[in-house]
Amino acid sequence: MRVNPNFAPNILNDLWQSQSQEQTALEEISTSKRVNRPSDDPTAAAADVLNQAAQSRTDQYLKNTSDLESMLQTADSTLSSVVTSLNQAISLGVQGANSELTPSNLQAIAQQVQAIQNQMVQLANTSFQGSFLFGGTLSQSAPYVLDPSQADGVQYDGNSGVNSVAIADGRTMQVNLPGDQIFQGSSGNVMGSLQQLMTSLQNNDINGISAATTQLKGALDYVSQQRVFYGNAINQLDSNQSFLQQEKVNLQTDETSLVGADMSEAATDLSQAQTTHQAALAALARVIPQSLLDYLK
């Protein structure tokens, strides 16, 4: 009785397993991940989905922070220009309060103040990336227009609302002050003081000129106080950006722990799988001719 053990199925199984291991190792090396599909490690894959979502949110918060910082810097720079214009108006008011000036001199000064008023309206209508900064929550149209029929010489078409933006999970911050608070505040009315100074100059009203100049000084102090909001907001965003960058590093580290491949181990697995694969091929090459000979017998 002849015994003819058939090793071919076993060798084929070894060949398939080594090829599968080789492909797995190659995939880990190419992606730097040991989990490339949920079936590789269901628990780690589920945790990685949450991690990826957190990373996406962090990236969006970083973009929000960067955009907001640019916007706030624009607003702060605008208020710096407002302060410069108010100082110019105060100097003109002090000059106009000189009782020795002629009506013609006062009219010339009034024209300069009117130019500052026009500039102030332009500053109050500053926009950033298509959105007006000082219209409250109404950011799609210019908040201020000149209107001599109004006591302050302007009409405010914005509102008193404020905008808040998410800058991290569970954290939002106010990112604007409405224009009527900055330029027409009860503690310092920029628009009203300019209008009063211009009117007093046009009417040769020395007492009115002095009173308007005093009001402008109060408005200057008030605007300077409003600028503190923007300075603090910029500092808060700087701090938030550092926090988010560290959070991103932490999430990436967590991702590596969850699904990252050990490249050294993957390289060793690949080498072993290739060796096993070659050995299986060699064994199969020997078995197939012998099996064929047995069949012919």
Image (cartoon, grey):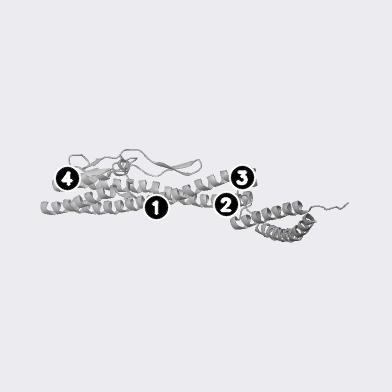
x then y, percent, for residue 78: 32, 52
Label 1 sits on a secondary structure element that is helix
**Residue in the picture at 48% in, 51% down:** 241
Residues 244 and 194: in front is 244
**Residue in the picture at 58% in, 50% down:** 250
For this orientation, the residue located farthest to the top is 160
Dot 2 crowding, Cα within 10 Å, few <14, some 14–19, many 20+: some
* Amino acid, disc 1: Ser
Q: Mark 4 sits on what residue?
A: 199
Label 4 sits on a secondary structure element that is helix
Label 2 sits on a secondary structure element that is helix
x then y, percent, for residue 286: 76, 61
x then y, percent, for residue 2: 86, 53
* Amino acid, disc 2: Gln
Rounded to the nearest whole Å, what is the CA distance between mark 1 and mark 2?
27 Å
Rounded to the nearest whole Å, what is the CA distance between mark 4 and mark 3?
76 Å
Residues 3 and 294: in front is 294
Q: Mark 3 sits on what residue?
A: 38
Residue 16 visible in this rendered orientation of the protein:
yes
